[in-house]
């Protein structure tokens, strides 16, 4: 009996779930769960685990391309892990720093902008929201055109948030007091926070612009649909 | 000069932004709706996590809310469905009960928000223990006790559905890739 080998074997669902980059993704999730469980009792370990998870974010993408195991599920898992871990860190920061509404607002901006981005990416059929090439904003083009610059801004955000968490010594701190004390006494932390503040600011501005761009895409989608019924 | 009236005037971007109500009739309205829901629920949970310290319970609920809705939306797009509320082909009985009956689904969603708001109103001190507050409701039956009791049930159903939805949506993402490999 001849075995039909002409049709390639369809991967099973389980095999996709067990792709190496997806396993890295699960490890990231578990690391985050454990990190946040101990975030109040062991701040240093929390920050180390959080940062390792952030580094793995880049590794799983590299692994997906290297092992030819790119998957939609992996990309979604990646994005959700990013969004949730950043959100949880902002929640923690809003507990520690008064006024907490600063960090609550940053949480709202992060979720809102990424949600709109993703929605509009789907409407346009683009591979990734990072492939936006047709925007007229110079900042947009600078941000998305230069992957190193974009990486710096993303890393700066996380470094800033983790630094602020490490810097908080009392259960409740005033954000302005902590930032002021960094300028009075120049320390490694001062330089770290200073460098990250710039990248963080760029990223937040891009988030706002992105929301407007994405909203326009949603609106134009409907307008163009009306054109040809 | 005859005015060409046969082609309907294309609405401008601004006019779509100013649709009343800008909720259901336009894509932007639907997205605005969902984002407002997600952010307002997330912010309320943040407030609750500050009041009921250390509030990791509420941090987890934020994570579940964002994660499940994100995956739902993604899988809805992959399937090309109008709305994630149109899932008809799931085999889970709870799923079918939840999405099949709009009144039940509405009750669960409302119950969540009522529970969170009630917990916020019930907190008298700047910092409370969640278990203490819940137990004190059982010791002394008040209107709040009944309200919280009724909402706890709906809230629990919604969280379980959120978890199931994540698994279903993840499967959709995986099957999307598998089927793409089939038909190159």
Image (spheres, coloured by chain):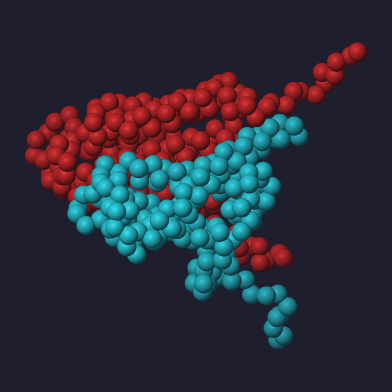
Chain colours: A red, B cyan
In the displayed structure, does residue A7 sit left or right of residue B84? right
* Relative image position of residue A211 (x, y in whole percent): 44, 54
Q: Position of residue B10 (x, y in %)?
A: 62, 71
In the figure, residue A34 lies in which quadrant? top left
Residue A12, by quadrant, is top right
The residue sitting at the right extreme is: A1
Q: Quarter holding the C terminus of chain B?
A: top right
Q: Nearer the viewer, residue A5 or B151?
A: B151
**Residue A117 visible in the picture:** no
Say whether residue A4 is left or right of residue B75. right
View extreme (left): residue: A184
Residue placed most toward the observer, B164 or A199: B164
Q: Residue at x 48, y 29 (%)?
A: A25
Residue B87, above or below B169: below
Relative height, residue B150 to residue A131 (above, below): below
Res A182 visible: yes
Residue displayed at 48% across by 28% down: A26
Residue drawn at (80%, 24%), measured in percent from left and top? A7
- Given the current orientation, which residue lies at the most extreme top position? A1
**Which of the image's four quarters has the N terminus of chain B?**
bottom right
- Count the labels in the image: 0
Across and down, in percent, residue A150 comes to 40, 38
Q: Is residue B97 left or right of residue A129?
A: right
Give the residue furthest to the bottom.
Answer: B1
Of the pair A48 and A200, the residue shown nearer to us: A48
Q: Pinpoint residue B45: horizontal percent, then vertical percent.
A: 35, 51
The residue depicted at 74 percent of the width and 23 percent of the height is: A9
């Amino acid at each position: 009996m001849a075995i039909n080998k002409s049709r390639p074997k369809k991967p099973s669902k389980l095999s996709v779930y067990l792709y190496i980059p997806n396993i890295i993704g699960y490890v990231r999730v578990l690391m985050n769960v454990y990190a946040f469980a101990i975030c109040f009792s062991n701040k240093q370990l929390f920050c180390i685990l959080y940062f390792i998870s952030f580094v793995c974010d880049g590794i799983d993408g590299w692994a997906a391309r290297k092992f030819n195991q790119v998957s939609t599920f992996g990309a979604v898992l990646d994005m959700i892990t990013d969004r949730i871990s950043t959100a949880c860190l902002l929640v923690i920061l809003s507990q520690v720093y008064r006024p907490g509404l600063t960090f609550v607002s940053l949480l709202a901006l992060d979720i809102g902008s990424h949600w709109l981005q993703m929605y509009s990416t789907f409407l346009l059929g683009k591979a990734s929201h990072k492939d936006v090439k047709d925007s007229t904003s110079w900042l947009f083009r600078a941000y998305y055109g230069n992957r190193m610059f974009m990486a710096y801004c993303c890393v700066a955000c996380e470094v800033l948030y983790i630094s602020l968490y490490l810097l908080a010594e009392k259960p409740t701190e005033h954000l302005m007091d902590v930032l002021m004390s960094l300028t009075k006494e120049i320390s490694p932390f001062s330089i770290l926070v200073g460098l990250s503040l710039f990248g963080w600011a760029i990223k937040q501005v891009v988030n706002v612009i992105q929301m407007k761009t994405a909203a326009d895409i949603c609106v134009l989608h409907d307008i163009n649909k009306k054109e040809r019924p």
